[in-house]
Image (cartoon, grey):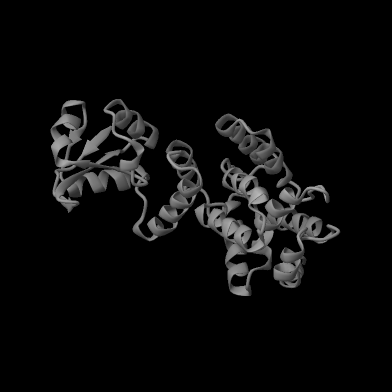
Amino acid sequence: MILVDPPVWPAHDTLWSHLVSDTSVAELHAFAGALGIGRRAFDLDHYDIPAARHREVVEAGATPLSGGELTRRLIGSGLRVRGRDRPLLKGLRRRWLDRRPEDFTPVDDLLVRWREPHRTYHDARHLAECLTALDLLADRPELTRTAELALWFHDAVHDGSTPGDEQASAALAVEVLDDPRVAELILMTAHHDPDPADPVAALVSDADLAILGAEPKRYDEYRRQIRAEYATVPEEQFRVGRAAVLEQLLALPTLYRTERGRRLWAERAGANLRGELADLRP
């Protein structure tokens, strides 16, 4: 259902309402689009509606509620963005639009995916950490543009299945971007063994694996987050599967494929992986 609260929020010399859906963000976008309300007015989980248009959105079918009731309904739907998450999500949205101005629809849809409630590690923070790692690695814009798009989409679909998640994410990238090269890079992240002659794939792989070279406190948090994503898997089964993943990573000729990645993270990543593997074994 589409909901709107009274225009009581002051900004830019007028008062504003919040327009939300307690069903889906897609429903909200469709309603706003039908009224010609552009995506610039969208703020992660609501549209800002000026007082002059409040009656119009009510007449179009939005249910008027008090601000408190609207907030309760939005929280109950699971669609509300928590205040503590807003700076991260706003920063990601701004980054996308800095590179692709006016391309609102893909980024808004991607951010809904990256904040799905079942994600504990493969969430918007992981995306942000990947992009930050790419910034540390990158020195050639012509390579990083494609690498960045691949990172935006690489876990856009995440149900805990490999390579099913990568295949579905790659298919989504082709649907949205019509770019098979981005899809190819996403599929590579299922095994992290990029072609040595492919510098873009090396950037994507290293950025995605940068977490392995994190400081011990962050790495321990990452371990807990991964376990939480597989909470339904029995402990012994998880230990066997996770150990196999770590062994596969340690068996790679080199974990990081860029010189800068090796310099930044290789030593600490090796220690982190070996330490976790030792904990997993009886």
Specify whether 258 is left or right of 136: right
What residue appears at the point 75 percent right and 68 percent down from the top-left corner?
Answer: 266
Q: Observer-nearest residue: 44 or 190? A: 44
The image position of residue 36, as x and y in percent, is 29, 29
Q: Is residue 26 above or below residue 280?
A: above
The image position of residue 195, as x and y in percent, is 82, 47
The image position of residue 27, as x and y in percent, is 35, 31
Task: Tell me where residue 83 sits by quadrant.
Answer: bottom left
Q: Observer-nearest residue: 232 or 51? A: 51
Q: Is residue 195 above or below residue 35?
A: below
Number of numbered tags placed on the structure image: 0
What residue appears at the point 61 percent right and 51 percent down from the top-left corner?
Answer: 230
Tell me the quadrant of the picture where the N terminus can be found.
top left
Q: Observer-nearest residue: 138 or 272? A: 138
| Residue 280 at least partly seen | no
The image position of residue 282, as x and y in percent, is 77, 67
